[in-house]
Image (cartoon, rainbow, N blue to C red):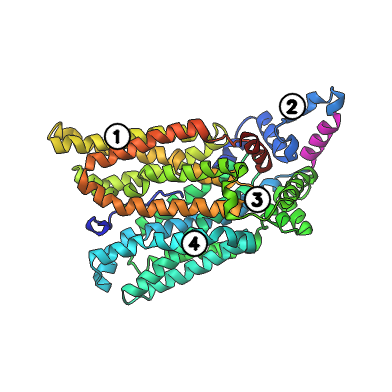
Amino acid sequence: MAAAFPLSTAPPLPLRHSAAGISLAFRLGRSRRTRHDVHCALRLPAAAAGVTCGQTRRATAVAAAQGQAAAGEGIHDSAGDGSLRMVLVSTAVAVCGSFEFGTCVGYSAPAQAGIVSDIGLSNSEYGVFGSILTIGAMIGALTSGRLADTLGRKMTMRLAAIVGIFGWLTIYFAKGATMLYLGRVLLGYCTGVLSYVVPVFISEIAPKDLRGGLATSNQLFICSGCSAAYIIGALLSWRSLVLVGLLPCAFLLAGLLFIPESPRWLANIGKEKEFRASLQMLRGEKADISREATEIREYIESVHSLPTARIQDLFDSKNMYAVIVGVGLMVFQQLGGINALGFYTSYIFSSAGFSGKLGTTLIGIIQIPITLFGALLMDRSGRRALLLVSSSGTFVGCFLTGLSFYFKAQGLYTELVPTLALYGILAYYAAYSIGMGPVPWVIMSEIFSIDMKAIAGSLVTLVSWIGSFAISYSFSFLMDWNSAGTFFLFSAASLVTVLFVAMLVPETKGRTLEEIQESLKASA
């Protein structure tokens, strides 16, 4: 059972779970010409956003492109730095939810010793406390899409933050196992909702040239929240550690007062005036949003002409491809073993003869810079390339770890066993953080049409949490069965992931959400 393994030294869990500032600094730090091109591309309407300023000037010689070139130049000249400022501020507020997600997941590891001592829980009872988070997350995943479509993206994040506050307070005042379980379920519901609505909100407000990097900040702040809970938890009591979880909820609630709602959601519910105001605020006070607004409105109108989306519509030919890609990525993300390694890294290191505390510290050190690096590459190399490199890396990492356990069981090369385990697990985490961690959530937020996003997004999120529970719960049984075989199974799943990505996953880099929908329809 899960409780048979020590959880107190588990590392920050890199489930999925600010790259925005780094990505922007990287772009703005290039040559003057490149800065000019990037700024122009961000201000062009969606239909012409792929045309650089230099290309626009050259196009003036062509009569058919004169109007477009003039419009592009006018947009560039009139738009100021504010066109990115509000997008970055809105993303920064939204990823407070991601940080909250991370603290919820990371809390159980450093709190174990204190809770077991003060409340008197057995190891099996604490195992329930650690894993029951996924039960609440499944419930949150089931309701997240409908809530986001009915209440709006901002109100849904606000609701999740309030539930999170109640969850943390319930744990803080707990005197027994029942209140601890209740608080943990509430935190699970909070994370289940946030795991869907945060990447969806970011993808709907971001310019297409920055969407991937900004969306990756979701994973970055999940990792940061886990790390914060783990590091601060070593210094504070388990009740005081609750404050680390309460703070991002408070920042999220306060920040939501100052950022606009998703313009695509406003357009979807027919709030034309609010839609244009939100889009204008996100693109800059002087930016010409007419073309982008028209493109979004026309797409929404085409969707509204269709019948109301139902669950069975997921299996229609026009939606099936996106569902296969979204669900498939989440299934392979979990089959790769991330939650098993996340919960039991310290145990894995110790079993292989390496220091569990040192190993988890090294993982915490590499996670955040690797995730930042992935964010920089997201809108340059593309989603598919990162997924292919990442899944290949997780294959190598799991294979090396499995090999170390095989050598240990056979009594071969005993001096190499700890080294192989260390290199294997570090390689796994590095590879996962650059691609298989953030990219499936980015793609999930991009590939579903606005009418199917609630149903399909909830399904994908639910599948992810079910996989999380299944893999983390079964890992102890698998290790009892065959330690080496367990990691060889994970490595085989990563190998199949490479084939899945190569054959089915589309590239969404550099395209608006509406353009992605058109390409998916052509592929269906």
Q: Main secondary structure of the magenta part?
A: helix
Q: Are marks 3 and 4 in contact (CB under 8 Å)?
A: no
Give the secondary structure at mark 1: helix
The reply to whether the magenta stretch includes residue 75 is: yes
Instruction: Give the magenta-colored segment's residue range.
Output: 66-78
Up-down relation of residue 308 to residue 211 (above or below): below
Residue at point 45% right, 44% down? 437
Q: Is residue 268 left or right of residue 404?
A: right
Between 30 and 137, the one nearer to me in the picture = 137
Q: Earlier in the sequence, mark 4 or mark 2?
A: 2
Q: Mark 3 or 1 closer to N-term?
A: 1
Q: Indicate the amino acid at tag 4.
A: Gly
Dot 2: what SS? Answer: helix
For label 2, the residue is 54
CB atoms at circles 1 and 2 under 8 Å apart? no
Q: Amino acid at mark 1?
A: Phe
Q: Establish if 127 lies above or below 282.
A: below
**Disc 3/disc 1 C-alpha distance (Å):** 40 Å
Query: Which residue bears the numbered disc 4?
Result: 140
**Element at label 3:** loop
Q: Do the residues bearing badges 1 and 4 touch, measured as CB atoms within 8 Å?
A: no
Q: In the rendered view, tell whether residue 136 sits above or below residue 62.
A: below
Q: Position of residue 329 (x, y in %)?
A: 47, 42
- In which quadrant is the C terminus drawn? top right
Measure the alpha-carbon separation of dots 4 and 2.
48 Å
Residue 335 percent location from the top left of the image? 38, 44
Type of the residue with mark 3: Ile
> Between disc 1 and disc 4, whose residue precedes?
4
